[in-house]
């Protein structure tokens, strides 16, 4: 059983909504981290499968589970992230949405950079950007991949919450994640990043790659075959994954 040693060095927040197969991969990518003293806050935004996935890893006290009790609105994960921030036990915050993964060096890099620069408020690393395609069967492509496989990335990005860590005081300074209006996308990463820069916070960008980003609209929103398959799962019998590809972890 993995446990937090005293206070966690960092809190990683994962927002999840109707994609249990991808949530499992995100959790495994944290359990594979080189730096083990973290907490992982998983926030379900009205996902009927997320608690079952969490319970599979419930022997790891670093993982904590919360649910959005407010009515669901399209919000690109902002509500879940704000719920996570309200419940963190660390002064340093990072993110890994359920359709992405962290590379093993991620938490180690974040903690090291903030530990060695006490005035640092926001840090951006880089991530491998992979387009998996548009339409059905794209989530299956991701689930089959090795957690650390970025061999076919098309570019390097930094402007995503996957590549970002910030202090608790930084988010208190600029305000919480903005909740999108239905159908409008700008309330997530880019909008918050602009607020960080416009408030003249102490921000640093480095070239170290710490995550793998799968193009969101391709792997989630348009994979109707996956979402249809979810409706036939019998969660009461323990069947809460569409696919059953397993990967090990090194920090149990």
Image (spheres, rainbow, N blue to C red):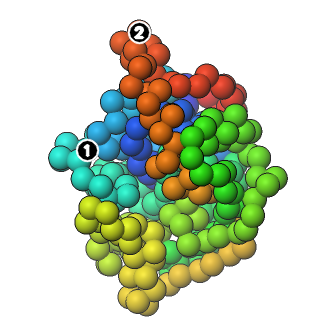
Q: Is residue 228 visible?
A: yes
Residue 48 in percent (x, y) is at: 33, 30
Where's the N terminus, which quadrant? top right
What SS does tag 2 mark?
A: helix
* Residue in the foreground of this view, choosing between 19 and 95: 19
Q: Residue shown at 38%/88% (left/top)?
A: 199
Q: Is residue 34 above or below residue 156?
A: above
Q: Residue shown at 67%/39% (left/top)?
A: 141
- Nearer the observer: mark 2 or 1; the answer is 2
Mark 2 lies on residue: 237
Circles 2 and 1 in contact, beta carbons < 8 Å: no
Residue 69 in percent (x, y) is at: 19, 42
Residue 212 in percent (x, y) is at: 66, 55
Q: Is residue 189 left or right of residue 134?
A: left
Q: Earlier in the sequence, mark 2 or mark 1?
A: 1
Q: Is residue 52 above or below residue 50?
A: above
Q: Residue shown at 32%/44% (left/top)?
A: 45
* Residue placed furthest toward the right: 151
Mark 1 lies on residue: 68
Q: Residues within 10 Å of mark 1 (few under 14, many from 20)?
A: some
Q: Is residue 89 left or right of residue 3?
A: left
What SS does tag 1 mark?
A: loop
- Quote the CA–CA distance across marks 2 and 1: 24 Å
Q: Residue shown at 69%/57% (left/top)?
A: 130
């Amino acid at each position: 059983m993995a446990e937090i040693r005293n206070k966690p060095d960092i809190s990683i927040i994962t927002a999840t909504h109707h994609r249990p197969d991808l949530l499992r991969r995100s959790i495994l990518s944290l359990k594979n981290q080189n730096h083990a003293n973290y907490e992982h806050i998983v926030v379900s935004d009205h996902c009927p499968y997320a608690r079952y996935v969490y319970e599979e890893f419930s022997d790891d006290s670093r993982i904590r589970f919360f649910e959005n009790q407010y009515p669901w609105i399209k919000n690109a994960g902002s509500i879940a992230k704000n719920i996570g921030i309200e419940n963190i036990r660390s002064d340093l915050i990072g993110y890994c949405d359920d359709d992405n993964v962290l590379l093993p060096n991620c938490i180690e890099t974040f903690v090291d950079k903030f530990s060695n620069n006490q005035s640092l408020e926001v840090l951006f690393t880089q991530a491998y950007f992979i387009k998996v395609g548009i339409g059905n069967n794209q989530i299956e492509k991701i689930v089959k991949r090795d957690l650390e496989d970025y061999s076919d990335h098309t570019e390097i990005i930094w402007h995503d919450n996957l590549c970002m860590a910030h202090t608790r005081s930084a988010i208190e300074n600029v305000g919480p994640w903005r909740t999108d209006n239905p159908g409008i996308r700008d309330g997530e990463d880019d909008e918050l990043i602009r607020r960080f820069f416009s408030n003249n916070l102490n921000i640093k960008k480095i070239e170290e790659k710490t995550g793998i980003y799968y193009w969101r609209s391709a792997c989630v929103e348009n994979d109707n075959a996956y979402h249809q398959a979810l409706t036939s799962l019998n969660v009461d019998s323990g069947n809460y994954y569409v696919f059953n590809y397993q990967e090990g972890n090194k920090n149990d």
